[in-house]
C-alpha cells in the first residue's frame, strides 16, 4: 500500500508526482535512525560575529567545517585537498557563480568570456550565467562543437546531471591559457558512482545537498588551487551575502563528522546505505522500462577505491528517453508526473530528467504511473 504524505486528502489519482527538482529527501530515514548523534546545540550567545577565522583567506569559513571537509575527502579518496583553498558557499549554486565571476574578472578582456557545458547539461547553469545579465561573461550553450577563439569557461559535471555519464572537458584545450574549466563534482560520491580516482583539478565544486541529502542547510564548498581565483570568489560571496550562515556550517561539520565515522562502521555505513537504496530504485526502474518504448542509459562498471570492489553506477537522476516521436515531458505531465524537459538541458523532446532522490512512496507512485503509460501504449487500437 502506497502511503504518500497527503495532508490535504487529495485522491491518489490526483496526486502530483514532482520529480522535476532533485530534492534529496530519500535519505531522511537514515538520518532519523541516527537519532541524536547529529544534534547540535547553539546557544543565544554563540556564532554572533560575521567572522569565523580572520587568518584564513576565506574568513567566513568555520574551522571545524574546513577540518570535516578535509577528513571526509581523505576517507573517501574522491578529491585532493592539499595545497588548495577551501571556499564555503551558500550551496554550490553560489560557488559556481562566484567561480564564473572570478575567472571572467581575471581573464581581464573587454569581450565577455564564453561559458559552455556539454549537452545534456545541468539546466540551472543557464539561469546562473544569464539571470544577472553580467557583461563579463556570456552563456554560449553546448560545448560540443564550440570552437570560438578567446577566453572561455567550460562547466564539467561528473557524474553528469542529467544523464549520469562520467565527463571530462570536451573542448579540451589543455595548453590554451584562455581555457578554464570548473569541475562540478556534486555527485562524485560512492553511493552514486565508483570512486575510480582522486580528482585533482583547479576548481572543484562539492555540495552537502547531494552527499547526505541536507539540501536545506545550503552548504557547498570549492577546492581551489589558485590563490587569486580563491580571493575573487571570496570577494564575490562577501558582496553577495557577507559570508555563509555559521549555524549551517556548524551543523554541516557535525553531520560530515558523523558520516565519516560511519564509513568505518559495519552496520550503519552511510554510503553503503545510500548505494543499496539507489541500487534498488534503479533495478525497479530498469525492470519497468524493460520491453517498453522507454530507454535508459547503460553505465560501465568501475573499480571503486572506496569500497574496494568493482561496482555499477546509480545516478541521482534517470535520463529517461522514448523510442517514439513524442514530447515525453508532456506525456508524463498528463500522468501527473513532473520532470525536467530534455530541451531545458540542451537535448530533445524525447528525453526527460527524473529525480531518483525522492521519498520512497513518491518513487513508488512514479513507477505505477510509468506502468500505466506502458499499459496504455500496449493497447492495440
Ligand atoms: N551542481 C549540480 C550538478 C547539481 O545537481 C546541484 C543541485 N541540483 C548543484 C550543483 C547545486 O547544489 P546546491 O546549491 O544545493 O549546493
Image: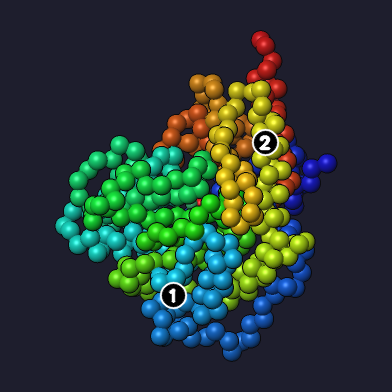
Q: Can you identify the residue that label 2 sits on?
A: 285
Work out whether residue 173 or residue 309 is closer to the camera in this orientation and state it. Answer: 309
78 sits left or right of 9 in the view: left
- Residue 310 screen position, x and y as percent: 62, 46
CA–CA distance in space, label 2 to label 1: 41 Å
Among the 4 quarters of the image, the one containing residue 380? top right
Q: Residue furthest left?
A: 110
* Residue 329 in view here: no
Q: Secondary structure at mark 1?
A: loop
Q: Which residue is mark 1?
A: 243
Q: x, y percentage for residue 204?
A: 43, 60
Query: Marks 2 and 1: which is nearer the front?
Result: 2
- Residue 165 at least partly seen: yes
Q: Residue at x 43, y 66 (%)?
A: 223
Name the side, left or right, on which 186 lies relative to 7. left
> Would you place residue 273 above or below residue 227 in this image?
above
Mark linked to residue 313: none
Amino acid at each position: 500500500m502506497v502511503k504518500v504524505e497527503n495532508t490535504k486528502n487529495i485522491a491518489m489519482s490526483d496526486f502530483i508526482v514532482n520529480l522535476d527538482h532533485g530534492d534529496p529527501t530519500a535519505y531522511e530515514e537514515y538520518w532519523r535512525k541516527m537519532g541524536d548523534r547529529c544534534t547540535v546545540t547553539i546557544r543565544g550567545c554563540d556564532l554572533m560575529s560575521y567572522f569565523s577565522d580572520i587568518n584564513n583567506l576565506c574568513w567566513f569559513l568555520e574551522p571545524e567545517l574546513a577540518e570535516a571537509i578535509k577528513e571526509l575527502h581523505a576517507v573517501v579518496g574522491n578529491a585532493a585537498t592539499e595545497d588548495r583553498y577551501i571556499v564555503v558557499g551558500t550551496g554550490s549554486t553560489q560557488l559556481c557563480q562566484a567561480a564564473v565571476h572570478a575567472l571572467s574578472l581575471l581573464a581581464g578582456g573587454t569581450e565577455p568570456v564564453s561559458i559552455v557545458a556539454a549537452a545534456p547539461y545541468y539546466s540551472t547553469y543557464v539561469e546562473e550565467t544569464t539571470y544577472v545579465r553580467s557583461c563579463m561573461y556570456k552563456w554560449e550553450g553546448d560545448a560540443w562543437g564550440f570552437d570560438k577563439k578567446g577566453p572561455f569557461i567550460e562547466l564539467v559535471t561528473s557524474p553528469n546531471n542529467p544523464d549520469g555519464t562520467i565527463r571530462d572537458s570536451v573542448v579540451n584545450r589543455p595548453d590554451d591559457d584562455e581555457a578554464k574549466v570548473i569541475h562540478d563534482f556534486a555527485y562524485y560520491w560512492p553511493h552514486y558512482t565508483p570512486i575510480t580516482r582522486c580528482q585533482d583539478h583547479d576548481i572543484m565544486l562539492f555540495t552537502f545537498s547531494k552527499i547526505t541529502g541536507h539540501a536545506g542547510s545550503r552548504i557547498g564548498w570549492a577546492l581551489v588551487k589558485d590563490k587569486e581565483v580563491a580571493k575573487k570568489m571570496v570577494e564575490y560571496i562577501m558582496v553577495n551575502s557577507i559570508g555563509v550562515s555559521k549555524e549551517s556550517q556548524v551543523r554541516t561539520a557535525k553531520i560530515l563528522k558523523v558520516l565519516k565515522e560511519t564509513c568505518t562502521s559495519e552496520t550503519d555505513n552511510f554510503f553503503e546505505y545510500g548505494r543499496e537504496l539507489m541500487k534498488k530504485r534503479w533495478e525497479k526502474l530498469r525492470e519497468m522500462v524493460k520491453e517498453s518504448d522507454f530507454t535508459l542509459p547503460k553505465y560501465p562498471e568501475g573499480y571503486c577505491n572506496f569500497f574496494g570492489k568493482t561496482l555499477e553506477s546509480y545516478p541521482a537522476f534517470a535520463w529517461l528517453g522514448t523510442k517514439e516521436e513524442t514530447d515525453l515531458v508532456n506525456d508524463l505531465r498528463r500522468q501527473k508526473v513532473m520532470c525536467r524537459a530534455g530541451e531545458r538541458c540542451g537535448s530533445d523532446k524525447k528525453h526527460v530528467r527524473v529525480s531518483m532522490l525522492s521519498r520512497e512512496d513518491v518513487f513508488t507512485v512514479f513507477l505505477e504511473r510509468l506502468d500505466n503509460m506502458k499499459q496504455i501504449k500496449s493497447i492495440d487500437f
